[in-house]
Image (cartoon, grey):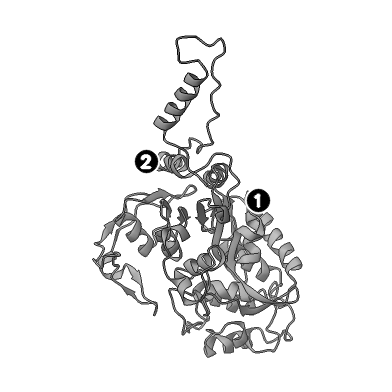
Amino acid sequence: MTSRAPLSLLVAAVTAVLTVAGCGSGTESSQPAAEAPACRTLADNAGWYGDNRDRINAMLTELGTCGADGSVTDGAPLALFDWDNTVVKNDIGDATFFWMVRNGKLRAPAGGDWSTTSPYLTPQAAAALSKACAATAPGQPMPTNTDLGCADELVSVYTDGETRADEPAFAGFNARRFEPSYAWAAQMLAGWPESELTGFAEAARKENLDAPEGTEQKVGSGDETGWVRYYPQMRDLVETLRANGFDVRIISASAEPVVRVWAAELGFTPDKVMGVRTERNGDVLTSKLVPCGGETAIPYIEGKRCRVNEDVFGVKGPAAFEQQPDAKRAAFAAGDSDTDVTFLSDATGLRLVLNRQKTELMCTAYDNSDGRWLVNPMFIKPMDKGDTYECATEGYIEPSGKEGPLHRADGSVVPDQQDSVS
């Protein structure tokens, strides 16, 4: 895949052709020269902050090939997008989990043992879920549309990572490669054929798109966010990247079958979507996670790099967690949260961040040590400017889950950063 030539070279080439044809020797042509059509650029939209749109358009000119059928295998530049709160406003993993609870579609574990739903579920959480949802036979759908106690325990474990008694729900995981509640949302889809699950995801999608902005829904006895919107600007960005020959893909910490349903609206085929995967028993989903890099990891922080390296560039084993040479890295990436910081950092061209005031990501983006970071407010309901990010002391998520100083690649500590783009 070749990039566009600089304008000066194009002008020189055109002049040479005209001279050979006798058009540069003083003889005027009776027909004006046809101009090559300009390739697509981003629509002018007030949602773009500062010169972000101009810089992305310049990258398209530098790296793109107008009208090419972009494929990494043929040398096309790769563009990677997180999904939740990056391509859409709000979270489709939440939307689907809440829909499943409200409609009584989550199944009790087939063997009756809640610890089988996650290798990191604590004994306290397994006991709390077993007690709250005891009315359901193993493997059967739980009537969480009417059994509010069961519904509330499920929602507490998922949204808070705690039982209703404030006991930790998960423990023992690497916080840079795994987020247990995100994984659990995918694992709790076990027992359904993917064809039926697709129908559930489509129903949840329609409901959340139809709901007015700001809608809250009753899930169990509590209120949760009940609406989702595609960002028009991100739809335009995806389509513009494709028009310029980029291979555009999704890397998400939501369940892969769910992301596929939502991503189809933007023309993503299943092979262009990466999310949390569980193994299958025939067509039926199980709760067993598909590993990455030889360990239990999901597309979360370093786990996103692992999945991209494995699936896109064929890097296997522990090496999939390591940053690869430029030729095996994305050219462009977009995200909004700490879970995105590693795959964004890997991008060799530009890295677009939608500001949701997530500390590690915003410390890295505002530090902008190589000048390739673009910060943009969220396109719908942007946040007010936040306080100073304490990057020098609490800017990095340790594998243990604790917070520590954020370091640059050269080992220096990133100083505290002021939130300025909201």
* Quarter assignment of residue 387: bottom left
Looking at the image, tell me whether mark 1 or mark 2 is earlier in sequence order: 2
Q: Is residue 45 left or right of residue 415?
A: right
**Disc marking residue 104:** none
Kindly state the secondary structure of the residue where label 1 is placed.
Answer: helix
Residue at the spot 40% in from the left edge and 42% down from the top edge: 55
In the foreground, 158 or 236: 236
Indicate the amino acid at tag 2.
Gly
Q: Position of residue 189 (x, y in %)?
A: 67, 73
Q: Position of residue 281 (x, y in %)?
A: 73, 79
Residue picked out by circle 2: 50
**Disc marking residue 265:** 1
* Quarter assignment of residue 194: bottom right
Task: Determine whether 323 is above or below 144 in the image.
Answer: above
Indicate the amino acid at tag 1.
Glu
Task: Determine whether 230 is above or below 303 in the image.
Answer: above
Does residue 248 appear anywhere in the picture? Answer: yes
Residue at the spot 28% in from the left edge and 67% down from the top edge: 407
Q: Position of residue 20 (x, y in %)?
A: 50, 21
